[in-house]
Amino acid sequence: MFGIAVAGSGCSYRLESIFFKDKVSAGPEITGSVPVKAVTVEPLAEADLVHVRAAALDAMGRSGKDISQPWENPSTGARGMVTPLSHAYETDGQTCRDFLASYVWKRAEVWMQGEACRFAEGKWEIRSMKPWKRS
C-alpha cells in the first residue's frame, strides 16, 4: 500500500523541487496556453456619449432602488447600462445623484462614473462623467 502511495505521488512532484529547494525560477511561471492581452479602448465617441447622457437623465427622473436604464447607439453598435448609485442628496442648493454607466463596444468594456443634478426648474443635467476608477 505504501509503495502505491509513493509511486502515485511522483506524478505531483518534480524531483528537482525536492532536491533543489533553493533554486529560483528565472522566468515567469506559465499557467495557461492563452496569452493575456491588454484591452485598449479608443476615446469614447461623442455620438455614443449622447446616448449615455440621455439614458442617465432618464434614469435620474425615475424613483426607486436599483433602476437601470439601457442605452444603445445603432449607428456604432455601442451599448450599455446606466444605474443610479445613491439616493438623491443636496449639494450647492441642488438635488444631485451619482450614477455608474457601462460602455460596451466590440470586445471592450469601459465603466464611467457620473453625477447628475436637478436644477430649480426640475430639469436634470449631467454635472460630470469620467472613467470609473475601481478602488
Image: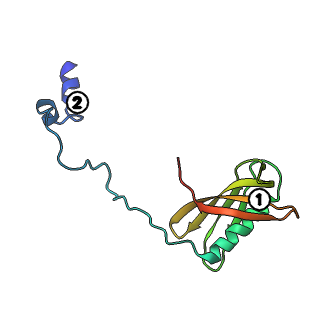
Foreground: disc 1 or disc 2: 1
Q: What is the x, y in percent for residue 89? A: 77, 48
Identity of the residue drawn at 69% across and 58% down: 115
Does residue 85 appear left or right of residue 9 in this picture?
Answer: right
Q: How many marks?
A: 2
- Residue that extends furthest to the bottom in the rendered view of this protein: 75
Quadrant of the drawing holding the N terminus: top left
Does residue 17 appear left or right of residue 43 in this picture?
Answer: left
Classed neighbour count for the residue bearing mark 2: other residues with Cα under 10 Å, few (<14), some (14–19), many (≥20)? few
Q: What is the x, y in percent for residue 41? A: 49, 68
Q: Secondary structure at mark 1?
A: strand
Q: What is the x, y in percent for residue 90? A: 78, 50
Name the residue that disc number 2 marks: 8
Name the residue that disc number 1 marks: 117
Q: What is the x, y in percent for residue 10? A: 19, 32
Q: Quadrant of residue 46?
A: bottom right
Q: Marks 1 and 2, how far apart in space? A: 67 Å
Which mark is first along the chain, 2 or 1? 2
Q: Secondary structure at mark 2?
A: helix
